[in-house]
Each structure stands twice: as structure tokens, then as C-alpha cells.
Image (tube, rainbow, N blue to C red):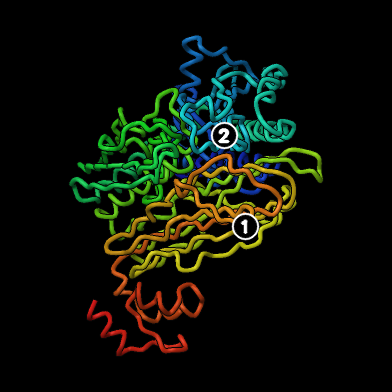
Amino acid sequence: MEKLDTITLSVIQAALQQVCDEMDLTFSRAAFSPVIAEANDRSDGIYSAVDGSLIAQGSQGLPVFVGVMQYSTKTVIEMIADGRCLPPEPGDIYIVNDPYLGGTHLMDVRFAMPVYRDGKIFCWLSNTGHWPDIGGSVPGGFSASATAVEQEGLRLPPVKLFKKGVLDPEIYAIICSNIRVADQRIGDIRAQAAALLIGQDRLFGILDRYGDETVVEAIAELRRRAAEQMRANISAIPDGIYRSQAFVDSDGVVNEPLTIALTVEKQGDTLSFDFSGSSKPCAGPMNSVLATTLSSVYLAMRHIFPDVPISAGAFEPLIVKRPEGTFLDAKYPRPVSGCAAEVSQRIAEAVFAAMVQALPDKVTAAPAGSSGNFALGGNDPARGRDYVMYQISGGGYGGNAGHDGLTNGCSTIGISKSPPVEIMEQAFPVLYRHYALREGSGGAGKHRGGFGLAYEVEILRGDARASFVMDHGRFGPQGALGGKDGAVNTVTVFRDGKEHVPPHLSKEQDIALKAGDRVRVGTPGGGGYGDPLARDPELVLRDVRLGYYTPEQAGEKFGVSLSKDGLAIDRAATDEKRAHR
């Protein structure tokens, strides 16, 4: 076969990416649950038939699933090889959500399907969707005080949900018997399977056009080039050791912070990540399984070097020492409901805090770093049915060397967005009384952090139970290079005219609510970048005029004095204040 030319290589690369993107779109458009259909809490990808390594992943999928689905697909292949799984046949689709087999939390349910060519498996297609409920002690699965994984919901090893293209009624019945609002899951299941079938059809189109051997050669070359590009980026970093820390508010059971201690060693064209100084395994659900820990490092580096094409090759120069004996390497039966949505973002924050020392022009201050997991389950008497509502929310991104942080951006780990208020009010018995930017929440800096979100939800009818697994309620997102931390996450529940703040600040479960009760949330702002006193006073004035900060905050945070009407800068007073500070 002739050497693969650059143009053909580029076309095949774009075509594989398009396959994954189309799977993503199919999944969202066909799904029933707002968390998938509107918030896009899902991902699709193509994986090696040999070892499950990543070939391509959809650009509209959650980055945290990059390493996770690679790990879980590898596990399925290994379990088939040693007889722990039934061998595959064309049309089979395996389902798995076991965190300890390359997963995240139980609500992230993965499908894996072998793609056959000439009687042999050419590759695997896999996707992950966040199911709004998977059983367990609380609606939505976000148990804030679980002490064992069984309390978090149904745990599935790899089993065939579809056999030769037909849904297995017995496996489906087992699933439905263990989850809430089971009648609504068929829509998500069919959508998840349809995405894989669309991917297979589109992949066949590429193979038929270019030939299987050419595509195999292109995949190998794309992996080699991704590794080469990542190594080139790493080579530009000064050799040395970079250390950082990040903190989880608490584990939901013991009201003490957990520490993520990171040492990054750069040597030549590789980066080594050592988390061995981190806290020991915790009692509550803020443990992270190894697959999620690895994926958190990968996605953080993806933020730093977004130009590197995504494939297993991009991860080869990143060496992550297994953090045995810490809460970042959870073993059965440790609970893990907070690992993907929260702990993963603290891991990424630790990577940012270390790497900003080495790459101050490329790395930002810490983003909000919380998915704002708020699950509400109850009965709607007007419709005569139960429901489970899952609210995710954005926050501020950190400032960087070039500009202020993004306001109300998605979580660090994904592209998921808050479902539209109108959709949520249509689907569930709630009213959003307030939904706006959280003014003043961005951390001060030469380039300030972006602002979080403030919202308030009222229960309109029926009884409900609320659970929260959030973070950054005790410590705000870290500022960088002299910048200040962003505002902390806040949760306030109003019941019978009384205010209730969770003892763990960002975590609590099973709070009983009734019609008229309200939940108010303020998500974190991003960390500031650089000395706040170096911020252009004109930018501070602009922020005050827009209502982002008050005149008093302009003085306190940035050393800028304004006129009494807040419409002009008092230059003399500003110079004096900044000189004094």
C-alpha cells in the first residue's frame, strides 16, 4: 500500500470526528431526559478493538469521559477475553456503570458495541449518558452521606442489554425494578443505542470509501502525531518540579476538608503526576475511582493544550502514578457519587495551580469547579406521577494572562449546560423565582474571574426531597499569581419561613420539601489572575456601571475610588489608596 498522504489523513481524521459528533447529536435529540436532551450530559467515541484505547471522541461530549470510556472499554475487552463476560456477536450492546470497572458515579451509564467487518471486530463504539436516577437511597442518586456504594444505586457489571440488536427484556426488567420513574428510561435507552447504530452506519461509509487498511493506517498515524505534538508542547516547559494543593469541602459524612496534594515533575518531553500526599480514602461519597482520576488529569492538560488532537496518543507523555492509599483511588465498596462531578474538578484545579507556575501565559486561575448537582424527587399530584429533576449549573472561569474569566461557563469537566428554565418548569412542578448572574462573585485580579450563577427554585405542588452534592462551599476557586479566590458556593433552603444552611455547606441529602418551600443557590466565581491593584481602573469602573461590583467592592477589592455617584474614577484617591496598600 502506498504511503498515506497528508490530505487523505486529514480527511479521515475529520470524518472520524464527524462520526462521533453525529452520535452526540443523535443521542441528545432522541433522549427523553432534560439532563441529556438539553444539558448534553453525555459523550460518544470510537475505541480500539485491541485494547480499548481512544481513537476519536465527539467534540460536543464531556471531556471527563475521555479517559473513562477508554478505561471501561478496555475492561469490557479484558472481561470477555477471560470469560467474565459473554462473548460478543454482531448487534450486541453491553451496558455497564460499575465505577470500579473504569467508570465514574453510578448515574453515568455506558453502552459499548462491537463493530464488525468481515466477521471480525474492527473497533468498539461506546457512549455514556447521565441517567437522572439509578435507584439508591435518594432520588437522583446524589447521596451526600452514603458510606457504601450500594446506598448510591444499582451497580451493573458489563452485561448484554441488546442481543443481536434486540433489547433483552429480562435485563431491562431488572433495571426498571431498581430505579425511579422507570417508565421514562426507555426513551434514554433507545436514544443511547440509536447513537451507536448511527455511528456504525457512518463509520461503514468511511471504511467503504477509503478501505479498511487505509483507515487503520490513518488511525495509527493520528495517534503517533498526537503523541508527538503533546511531547513538543511539554518540551517547551522548563524542567523542574511544580507543586500545588486543592481542597474538597468535606466528604459529606465527616465535616473536614480533604486535601489533593499534587507534585508535577517535568523532565524532557514527559510530565509525571504524583498525588500520593493526598488524603486517605474517605467515609463519604467524595472518593474518586482510578479511571476518573486519570481522566481528570487528561482533561486538565487538554484545557492547557487544546490544539493537540484528541486520541490515546495525546495521553502517552502524561505519566500518572497510581495514588494508592488515597481517596483518589477508590476501591469497592467506597461510595463515589461525587467523584466525576466534583472531585474530578478539584484534581483539575490542582493541575492548573501547578502548571500556571510553569506556563503563566497559557494556564488560567481556577474555574468554579462544581457541577452544582441538585437533585429533586417527588410526586406531582397534578399529573399523577413521580418525577426526578436534576439541575446542573455553571460558574465563573478563572482569569488568565490575556483577559478576564468567562462568566457562567460550564463545569471544568464538560460542555454540559444548565437546562433552559422553561424546559424545567414545563417538565417538573417548580418555578424559578430568580435566575441571574451572581454579581460580585468573580475573584479580584489584574484580570478578574468570571461570575457565577444565582438562582432560586420554588416547589409548586406536592411533596419532594432535595439532595445536594456540590463543592467550593468552604474554599473559593483559587486565584493565580497574586489574584484572589472566587466567591464560594452557597446553598440556602427556605422551609416554613425558616432558613436552613447545610452543615457541610455544599452537601446534604433527603431534605423534605413541600409546596411553597424554596431552594436558593449561588455558584462560585472564578479565581482572579494577577495583582488586583494592577487592574486598569477603567475596567473596574466599567464593571461597577454594569452592576458586577458595587462601588464599595471596587475600593475593597481593586483599590479604586469612585465619585459619589459611582460614574467616574477619583484618580487622586485611587492613587493614594493603591500606594498605601
Residue found at the very far left of the displayed protein: 240
- Badge 1 amino acid: Gly
- Badge 2 amino acid: Met
Across and down, in percent, residue 545 comes to 49, 80
**Which image quadrant is residue 401 in?**
bottom left
Report the side of 232 relative to 520 (left or right).
left
Residue found at the very far top of the displayed protein: 83
- Label 1: which residue? 497
Vertical position of residue 456 compared to residue 88: above or below: below
Does dot 2 land on a helix, a strand or a loop?
A: loop
Q: CA distance from mark 2 to mark 1?
A: 34 Å
Vertical position of residue 556 compared to residue 524: above or below: below
Per the rendering, the mark at residue 237 is none
Q: Nearer the viewer, mark 2 or mark 1?
A: 1
Q: Number of numbered discs present?
A: 2
Across and down, in percent, residue 158 comes to 55, 20
Q: Residue at x 41, y 78 (%)?
A: 552
Across and down, in percent, residue 497 comes to 62, 57
Q: Residue at x 57, y 46 (%)?
A: 374
Query: Can residue 1 be seen in this snapshot?
Result: no
- Label 2: which residue? 107
